Image: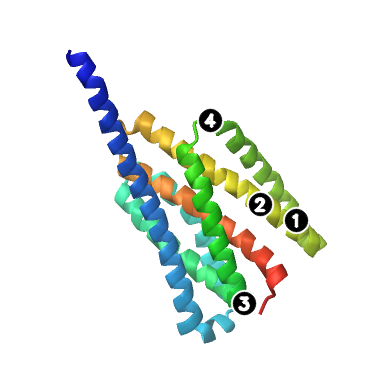
Amino acid sequence: MNNYEQQPRQTINTEVGLNGFMTKMFGWMGLSVLVSAVTAFLMATQFSGALQNLNGGMVILPIIVWFILPFVISGQSMKRPTVAFVGLMVYAVVTGAVFSIYTLMYNNTSIAGAFVSSAAVFLTMATIGVTTKRDLTKIGTQASAALIGLIVAMLINIFLRSSLIAMIFSFVAVIIFAALTAWDTQRMKKMYLKYGDQVSTTGLAVNGALQLYLDFVNLFLQLLQIFGLFGGRD
């Protein structure tokens, strides 16, 4: 009798815990996007003069921090979840500051179009990652390998300076990061179900929020380049 009652109760507890974890992860990811958007807006409106007078030396430090911080946050997420969360918010601010530079390069229509499109793609793929019964590990692995090859090709195109190749690469990158969004969502769901009672769920949520935030940021960057080519730049 007890065995039959225990299984449904355990299933309900698991579902409640998973829903709470996913809500926390997506909530923090959404908060990070909001912090970046507000920071970029404030930088572009309140400090527009300073942005226009930026030189290479003033830009290089934030960009270095921008590249390094994700590794620090990921490394601290399971050891010091609170520190990792603060790091995520700091990273969101730094990202917004870096992205404010794009307001000098692209018009508002292109930026708004890229943001709405990236949000739509992200929400669609994240929903697929949460709901699909198919194992996306193979797709995620292939997308990760394709991303490495694409980065190498993009570096080569810096010297070729081909706008057509850059546009093609941006479309390919959107497909890659869309696939990674679905995979990362499913991967974090599986990690919670497997290790949720053994590790800090807060740290796991911070790590997942960081991964999904990076997926969204890269979707936005690539779509911004596409919209910039078709919609014009400032």
Q: Which mark is residue 135?
A: 4
Secondary structure at numbered mark 2: helix
Residue type at mark 3 is: Asn
Of the numbered discs in the image, which one, if any, rests on residue 168?
Answer: 1
As measured in the structure, the alpha-carbon distance from the residue carrying label 3 to the one carrying label 4 is 40 Å
Q: Could you tell me how far apart the alpha carbons at marks 2 and 4 are, in whole angstroms?
A: 22 Å
Residue 11: image location, x then y, percent: 29, 27
| CA–CA distance in space, label 2 to label 3 | 22 Å
Q: Earlier in the sequence, mark 3 or mark 4?
A: 3
Give the mark nearer the N terminus: 3 vs 1: 3
Instruction: Please state which of residues 16 and 40 is positioned toward the viewer in this rendering.
Output: 16
Q: Viewed as shown, does residue 4 lie left or right of 207?
A: left
Q: Residue at x 36, y 51 (%)?
A: 84
Report the amino acid beneath label 1: Ile
- Labelled pair 3, 4 in contact (Cβ < 8 Å): no
Crowd band around label 4 with a 10 angstrom C-alpha radius: few (<14), some (14–19), many (20+): few
In this orientation, does residue 215 appear?
no
Check disc 1: other Cα within 10 Å, few if <14, some if 14-19, many if 20+. Answer: few
**Mark 3 Cα within 10 Å, few/some/many (few <14, many 20+)?**
some
Classify mark 1: helix, strand or loop.
Answer: helix
User: Which residue lies under the disc numbered 3?
Assistant: 107
